[in-house]
Image (cartoon, helix red, strand yellow):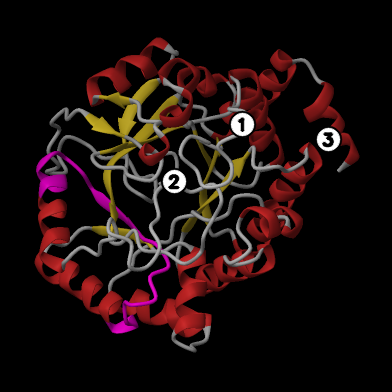
Amino acid sequence: MRDLLDFYTNAPLLELGLEADRIREQKHPLGVVTYIVDRNINYTNVCVADCGFCAFYRRPKHGEGYTLSYEQIGEKIEETKALGGVQILIQGGHNPYIPFEWYLDLLRYIKMYHPIHIHGFSPSEVDFFATRFRMDATDVIRELKAAGLDSIPGGGGEILVQRVRDIAAPKKAGADRWLEIMELAHNAGMKTSVTMMYGIGETLAERIEHLQRVRELQARTHGFTAFITWPLQPENTPTMSHMPKTDAVTYLRTVAMSRIVLDNIPNLQSSWVTMGMKVGQMALRYGCNDFGSLMIEENVVSAANTTHRTTTDELDRLIVDAGFTPARRRQDYSIISSDDGVSMAAPVVAATAAA
């Protein structure tokens, strides 16, 4: 821990980058940088978690609260597939008015009428379901999987240190519980991603602790497909609008350190949606082998006035200019070829950091 913290704190930026790039090249020697085309469908913005860093949610009975119908979600999926999307990321607030059967019926509806890979329901949502419906988390995961859930996103991780979570998100699943649910999902045969949102009041040592806890779980389960880190977007947030925005150097140091510590997680995503295209491109030389998601719809990051838009053509160009070969992928990081019957249209889209 001390050596890692010293390296993170004091090593020159280029030294960190070179070590991270060495690990990236060792894991991905062919020089391919991938990305996925998908859509983030936020089925409800009603939430009782009251996270201080979230500009998206609305409290129950707020005039701007909503819950989408199955038909609205189905229309969004068909639009996604028409534009070459291969999955949906489905997440929502902790809405106390939605029964558990609604979620199961939604998954069945999607698989029957709008079949697509469903990457959904973060550990915080799973924990909320278990608490709200008085179920064991293992049973929640089992029933969601049986109804059609394919994989689980790493949202809601923030910083996996309880001191920080008690300040930033005291009503949401704690650090141990978040990791426990991920382990339960892995044991149930589900693959997941994992995230770190920094800049919410944690120390550098607590960022390293987060990374080490993720590494330890991966060593046991091998269930994480990718790691994504991005900074707090403070605009419009309830209690953190005064927090400073991260700079490019801090982001590159953090993403490089993530690649160095998490040498047992195969993929690292660049968060160009929060940092912009050029910094996102630079991250490809600081350990990242994936350009994340071209997301046809994104609402959470956008609620904090941070939305960078691009096209598949521009992403391809940025990857090539950085010295790599671009390729579209699926959630499991398998490459999509021109023979797979997927539309290769080039939509203008917004993207997310965590898919």
Question: Residue most toward the top?
Answer: 321
Q: Residue at x 18, y 68 (%)?
A: 111
| Element at label 3 | helix
Nearer to the camera, 208 or 99: 99
Q: Percent x, y for residue 257?
A: 69, 32
> Whole-Å distance between the Cαs marked 3 and 2?
31 Å
Q: Which residue is mark 1?
A: 255
Asked whether residue 230 is drawn in magenta, I would say: no
Q: Residue at x 43, y 21 (%)?
A: 276
Three-letter code, disc 2 = Ala
Q: Percent x, y for residue 191?
A: 46, 60
Asked whether residue 81 is drawn in magenta, I would say: yes
> Whole-Å distance between the Cαs marked 2 and 1?
24 Å
Q: Can residue 189 be seen by looking at this rendering?
A: no
Three-letter code, disc 3 = Leu
Q: Earlier in the sequence, mark 3 or mark 2?
A: 3
Nearer to the camera, 220 or 284: 284
Three-letter code, disc 1 = Val
The residue range painted magenta reads 79-101
Within-10-Å neighbours for mark 1: few <14, some 14–19, many 20+: many
Q: Is residue 306 above or below residue 120?
A: above
